[in-house]
């Protein structure tokens, strides 16, 4: 989406508690120094994580970077483009913002950099925080080793490792299929070979060897055989006696032979083995990473069903300390206060939009000053003459965008702020319950002991069976549901109140909408294919770009308790669409008799064109980064302030889930059609190799920084999508082999219930009319016996034709498979038996592997509660880990320089929040101070940075700003007579 010209994520807020990763080794002195001024490598890596004042200070130095350290784009702009008025309209304005500073912002804050010189340890490329003033340089997109990808999170590292490994696997699988490629391109399969075909189609199952034959029965119904789409393969004429005859073209290629089928079968087995080994390797890598890094989840647990009035953190600490040898260190009591958070958030959005329309330095808390400046802006706009383009937009596009709160006038924004303030005050009057509780122990042993003591079966939990646990394990007489939580930076605090049932309903609605979009795109793609094959491939690419963005907008309707669940839901929808749109839809809309054709509209050429699009067009579009370059080279030079110019240099937002969809789409496309085109393995190898290096370049030169990504998407892909692709390969390949030769005719001597006339049909027939009404002089029939129509498209049979073995022929009029013998060429029936029954086994193993374990596990959990872990206890205390953070409720929006806190943090260690504004206080970014409410400990904000003390309450200005006394026992204004309206955090 866009936020007044600023690229952002489309959702109204993303939960983020910023970074959770920390090395178990002790920090170096340099790392400690950086941590003290607010930055560390495990924070949320994103460009706007610095204040405007700090950016301005740094840009003065960064704009003088050495030439060799700059990107090519920056060198081109500074040396050439910025001197032309068509590129830089403000070049003659001395007060205009600096493009050099904006590009310095792009390279030093938006893009990732690593330390050099004395700051590099053990030859590793240690990532620097945005704006680091020590010696750093940009990551080299060509020379950076794969081990450095973990600096973006283990999920990013696993993604690149998987892409590279699968590319190698496809290359090896392609080598296995060399025999098939040689066979299919030779004259032994197709008379005349494949010399006249495009290189990537040579060696596929395309067959151009056809003979005209006389069809004695059933072929007069062209719709049954698919000839209404291929009318040049269908004709009528008369014999010498004047009898009307029907002629059809019969495929003479015999491609479904045992050697070719078994090579494809061996390829499938090889892929299964390689995938299994890759899964084992990645699991060990994930465990090793988890053991090497201490994260918040290693010390914490979550209570999912707390009593609604259990607001006091002290109660939770006292309860859980009985299970730990050491103390409970941190407790977060999260409320279901989403209406209040949403109102406060929208109010801040409107204030931020208005701030950008007013002169710099306006105090947005001074209502009278703001109104005066708004009036001045209105007068200025009314006196300014509009250009033709601006007038056109104001009459057409802008009124529509204003419905979605874009391009609002200053007076409208001021009114919206007032309305939002009223909504906040109404929300403050509501009563909120406890939604979840997060408890962080000082040791991993304490967390594991508590989980072991409190984990019960689902049945005991639903029935609140108090006999299932020890008496001391009941909290206020209630059996608790405790689980290991996700990391703090993945918690979506605004969605904790939503019930499981409502989440399911919302996901079902969005899923149905996606299904409708798939159907609509199918009709459009089919229409485009009927017009022109090139338009067909372009249409597929356009829909692959548009529909995922629509799916992201649909995600606004869904509610998820953590970012991993959100990513998986979006991943599922986009992958489903792209698999259907790119792979399955092509086969559905292609006439059956066109499967082995060579024309651009036929199946194999269409799929090859799609693969080439994925190999060339898709990565080129990513490299062109049209939207990002438009912002950098069109909007940025025309920005009126340095802040707006910098924000247009904030990089292109990327989503790891979407990258996985592109990756899995290529895998699915390759294995789906590998039976009829073994070249797909080599095309897939080249596509994934290009994707690997293009994504690597984008990560280091184009994409904006993103939050730390865990292993959820990698695990989700392995368990569901990759296994599904292999299972479908087994099933679809068995159908491909069984349906050869794709001409819907059978010899008369192979009929089940029809006896042919026995005539000798060889000869020349004159006055022929093709199915497209074209008249030709004559055709030559060289086959003595006639044929009959027999439906080879198994899914159109009235009976269920699975598995696709030779026995399915008995369901139709005739037999088309070559006879069952182990001597070539008559061995198609043997091949279909092997492949058909193997597909049954593959389907059964898939169901057992993907769903069986989960079903059995969930059934056992109904009656038995158990807790186990596959990692070792690090024996390191939580408080000794330098780069680790607590569960502090906060909301994040990319257009804001820092997340918005949603709780009182006066009395907690400020290092546990996870980020720091070097020139401002956390009060500036805390929603609880936006609108006064009963029970506030203090109303006046501290504006300067408070990190020189352990917590805000110890700051020298604390008492002078309304804070007084010991507030350790207060919970967001909680008193004996009232309930809190904000979540509560407490640190011991």
Image: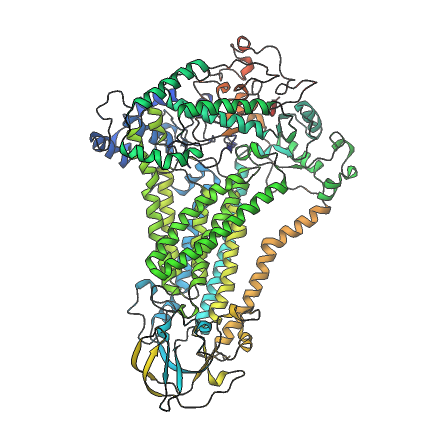
Does residue 710 appear left or right of residue 75 in this picture? right
Asked if residue 888 shows in the view, the reply is no
Compared with residue 52, is residue 279 higher up or lower down, i.e. above or below? below
Compared with residue 691, is residue 977 higher up or lower down, i.e. above or below? above
What x and y, as percent, mark residue 728? 51, 60
Q: Residue at x 29, y 70 (%)?
A: 195
Q: Residue furthest top?
A: 960
What x and y, as percent, mark residue 776? 29, 79
Identify the colour scheme used. rainbow
Q: Nearer the viewer, residue 686 or 11?
A: 11
What x and y, as percent, mark residue 630? 31, 37
Q: Residue at x 50, y 52 (%)?
A: 516
What x and y, as percent, mark residue 432? 64, 27
Asked if residue 772 shows in the view, the reply is yes
Q: Nearer the viewer, residue 344 or 572?
A: 344
Quarter of the image holding residue 179?
bottom left
Q: Nearer the viewer, residue 325 or 594?
A: 594
Quarter of the image holding residue 759?
bottom left
**Count of all numbered marks drawn on residues in the image:** 0
Q: Residue at x 27, y 36 (%)?
A: 73
Quadrant location, the N terminus: top left
Does residue 294 appear left or right of residue 775 in this picture? right
Quadrant location, the C terminus: top right
């Amino acid at each position: 989406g866009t936020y007044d010209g600023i690229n952002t994520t489309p959702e109204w807020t993303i939960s983020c508690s910023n970074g959770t990763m920390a090395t178990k080794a002790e920090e170096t002195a340099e790392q400690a120094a950086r941590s003290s001024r607010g930055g560390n490598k495990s924070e949320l890596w994103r460009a706007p994580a610095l204040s405007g004042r700090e950016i301005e200070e740094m840009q003065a130095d960064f704009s003088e970077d050495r030439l060799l350290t700059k990107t090519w784009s920056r060198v081109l702009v500074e040396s050439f483009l910025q001197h032309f008025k068509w590129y830089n309209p403000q070049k003659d304005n001395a007060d205009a913002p600096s493009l050099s500073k904006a590009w310095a912002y792009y390279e030093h804050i938006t893009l990732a950099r690593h330390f050099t010189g004395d700051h590099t340890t053990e030859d590793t490329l240690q990532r620097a925080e945005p704006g680091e003033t020590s010696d750093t340089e940009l990551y080299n997109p060509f020379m950076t080793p794969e081990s450095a990808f973990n600096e973006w999170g283990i999920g990013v590292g696993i993604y690149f490792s998987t892409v590279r490994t699968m590319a190698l696997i496809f290359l090896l699988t392609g080598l296995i299929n060399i025999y098939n490629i040689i066979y299919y391109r030779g004259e032994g399969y197709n008379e005349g070979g494949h010399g006249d075909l495009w290189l990537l189609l040579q060696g596929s199952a395309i067959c151009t060897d056809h003979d005209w034959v006389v069809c004695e029965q059933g072929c007069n119904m062209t719709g049954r055989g698919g000839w209404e789409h291929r009318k040049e393969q269908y004709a009528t004429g008369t014999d010498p006696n004047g009898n009307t005859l029907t002629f059809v073209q019969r495929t003479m290629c015999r491609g479904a032979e045992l050697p070719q089928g078994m090579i494809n079968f061996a390829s499938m087995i090889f892929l299964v083995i390689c995938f299994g080994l890759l899964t084992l390797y990645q699991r060990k890598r994930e465990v090793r990473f988890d053991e090497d890094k201490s994260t918040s989840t290693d010390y914490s647990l979550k209570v999912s069903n707390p009593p609604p009035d259990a607001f006091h953190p002290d109660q939770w600490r006292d309860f859980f300390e009985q299970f730990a040898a050491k103390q409970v260190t941190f407790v977060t009591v999260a409320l279901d206060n989403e209406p209040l958070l949403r109102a406060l958030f929208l109010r801040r959005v409107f204030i931020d939009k208005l701030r950008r329309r007013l002169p710099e330095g306006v105090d947005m808390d001074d209502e009278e000053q703001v109104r005066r400046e708004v009036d001045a802006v209105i007068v200025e706009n009314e006196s300014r003459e509009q250009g033709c383009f601006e007038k056109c937009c104001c009459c057409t596009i802008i009124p529509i965008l204003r419905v979605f709160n874009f391009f609002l006038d200053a007076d409208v924004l001021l009114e919206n702020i007032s309305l939002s303030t009223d909504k906040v005050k109404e929300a403050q009057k509501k009563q909120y319950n406890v939604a979840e509780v997060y408890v962080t122990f000082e040791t991993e042993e304490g967390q594991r002991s508590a989980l072991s003591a409190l984990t019960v079966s689902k049945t005991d939990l639903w029935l609140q069976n108090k006999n299932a646990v020890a008496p001391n394990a009941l909290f206020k007489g209630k059996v608790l549901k405790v689980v290991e939580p996700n990391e703090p930076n993945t918690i979506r605090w605004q969605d904790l109140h939503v019930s499981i049932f409502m989440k399911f309903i919302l996901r079902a609605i969005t899923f149905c909408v996606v299904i409708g979009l798939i159907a609509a795109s199918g009709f459009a793609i089919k229409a485009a294919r009927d017009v022109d094959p090139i338009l067909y491939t372009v249409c597929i690419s356009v829909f692959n770009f548009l529909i995922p963005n629509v799916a992201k907008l649909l995600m606004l309707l869904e509610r998820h308790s953590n970012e991993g669940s959100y990513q998986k839901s979006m991943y599922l929808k986009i992958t489903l669409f792209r698999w259907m749109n790119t792979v399955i839809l092509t086969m559905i809309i292609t006439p059956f008799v066109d499967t082995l054709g060579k024309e651009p509209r036929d199946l194999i050429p269409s799929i090859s064109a799609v693969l080439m699009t994925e190999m060339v067009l898709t990565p080129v579009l990513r490299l062109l980064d049209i939207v990002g370059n438009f912002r950098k080279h069109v909007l940025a030079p025309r920005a009126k302030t340095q802040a707006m110019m910098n924000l247009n240099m904030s990089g292109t937002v990327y989503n790891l889930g979407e990258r996985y969809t592109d990756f899995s789409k290529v895998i699915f496309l390759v294995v789906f059609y590998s039976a009829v085109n073994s070249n797909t393995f080599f095309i897939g190898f080249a596509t994934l190799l290009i994707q690997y290096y293009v994504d690597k370049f984008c990560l280091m030169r184009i994409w904006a920084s993103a939050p730390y990504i865990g292993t959820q998407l990698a695990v989700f892909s392995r368990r569901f999508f990759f296994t599904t692709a292999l299972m479908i390969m087994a099933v679809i390949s068995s159908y491909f082999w069984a349906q050869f030769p794709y001409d819907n005719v059978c010899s008369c001597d192979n009929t089940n219930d029809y006896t042919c006339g026995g005539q000798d049909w060889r000869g020349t027939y004159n006055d022929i009319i093709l199915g497209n009404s074209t008249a030709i002089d004559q055709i030559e029939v060289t086959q003595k016996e006639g044929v009959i129509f027999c439906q080879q498209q198994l899914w159109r049979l009235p009976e269920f034709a699975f598995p696709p073995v030779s026995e399915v022929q008995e369901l139709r009029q005739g037999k088309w498979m070559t006879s069952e013998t182990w001597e070539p060429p008559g061995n198609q029936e043997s091949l279909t038996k092997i492949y058909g029954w193997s597909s049954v086994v593959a389907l059964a193993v898939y169901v057992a592997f993907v769903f069986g374990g989960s079903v059995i596990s969930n059934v056992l959990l109904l009656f038995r509660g158990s807790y186990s872990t596959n990692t070792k206890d690090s024996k390191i205390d939580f408080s000794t880990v330098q780069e680790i953070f607590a569960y502090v409720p906060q909301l994040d929006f990319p257009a804001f320089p820092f997340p918005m806190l949603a709780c009182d943090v006066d009395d907690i260690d400020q290092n546990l929040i996870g980020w720091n504004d070097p020139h401002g206080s956390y009060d500036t970014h805390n929603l609880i101070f936006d609108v006064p409410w009963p029970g506030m400990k203090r109303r006046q904000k501290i504006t300067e940075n408070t990190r020189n003390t352990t917590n805000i309450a110890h700051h020298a200005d604390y008492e002078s700003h309304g804070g007084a006394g010991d507030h350790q026992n207060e919970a967001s204004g909680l008193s004996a007579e009232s309930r809190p309206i904000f979540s509560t955090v407490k640190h011991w």
